[in-house]
Amino acid sequence: MTVAVREVDRVVAFVHEAGLELNEDERKWDHMGALIVDAALQPRTRYKATVWPRARRIRDEWPDARTTTGLRARLESVDLPTYLAWRRTSPKITKIYDLAAVMGDLGVDTVDDLAERFRDPALERATRQALRRVNHVGPKTLDYLAILTGSNNHVAVDQHIATFVRNAGVRAHAYEEIGGIMRTAADVLGCSPGALDAAIWNHLSTRNTGGPRAC
């Protein structure tokens, strides 16, 4: 996909205008249970107030769920909606179970296992294809999963990223189009796509929703 130079220039200029700090900080869970809960609950939800405390609780109180095997055992013995204080009929609860099941089928037992699959192009394609079979898992969730393994080469285009790009004066709406602009802009800025993603997300989410995405 060809990215227009003028669109990239607008985003780069807007990054400078906003005074964003482009830090190469790794965003990574070392706990599969926390990673899966984070990715499943995150869409359209206040991260700092709602998602982060639940993912952190899973990490702190379920040490055995550091692996997919341990998480699936926990899910068989615990009433998850009650534990997370989440609506029982929410698709996000189902998504947690389904993501854990697919990870198990793929032989992904640790965060490092998943990270390895997102580093290899062929394995990444297979991983994405398998995880897309889970309801409500699309390109953004897949890129976000990669980010939560520590990848700085992925961009999860959510409402904050899309808003920032539009506010820069870029008329782009398609997920891949915005992602391409972000990756090229990051190259111009001399940072990773993940660092630009994090800087924009933290800038807008802190201002608009009360807390940054972090882990």
Image (cartoon, helix red, strand yellow):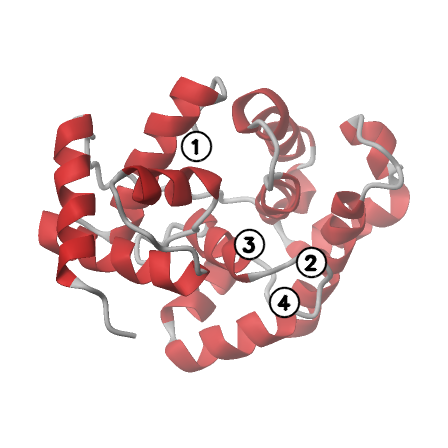
Q: Is residue 52 visible?
A: yes
Residue indicated by mark 2? 99
Q: CA distance from mark 3 to mark 4?
A: 9 Å
Q: Residues within 10 Å of mark 2 (few under 14, many from 20)?
A: many
| Residue 110 in the image: above or below residue 129 | above
Q: CA distance from mark 3 to mark 2?
A: 11 Å
Q: CA distance from mark 3 to mark 1?
A: 15 Å
The type of residue carrying mark 3 is: Thr
Of 107 and 162, the residue lying toward us: 162
Q: Are marks 2 and 4 in contact (CB under 8 Å)?
A: yes
Q: Are marks 3 and 4 in contact (CB under 8 Å)?
A: yes
Left or right of 76, for residue 99: left
- Looking at the rendered image, the quarter that the N terminus falls into is bottom left
Element marked by disc 1: loop
Image quarter for residue 83?
top right
The type of residue carrying mark 1 is: Ala
Q: CA distance from mark 4 to mark 1?
A: 23 Å
Residue indicated by mark 4? 131
In percent of width and height, residue 23 lies at: 21, 36
Of 139 and 5, the residue lying toward us: 5
Is label 3 or label 1 in front?
3
Element marked by disc 2: helix
In percent of width and height, residue 173 lies at: 42, 55
Residue indicated by mark 1? 214
Which comes before the other along the chain, label 4 or label 1?
A: 4
Element marked by disc 4: helix
Q: Residues within 10 Å of mark 1 (few under 14, many from 20)?
A: some
Residue indicated by mark 3? 141
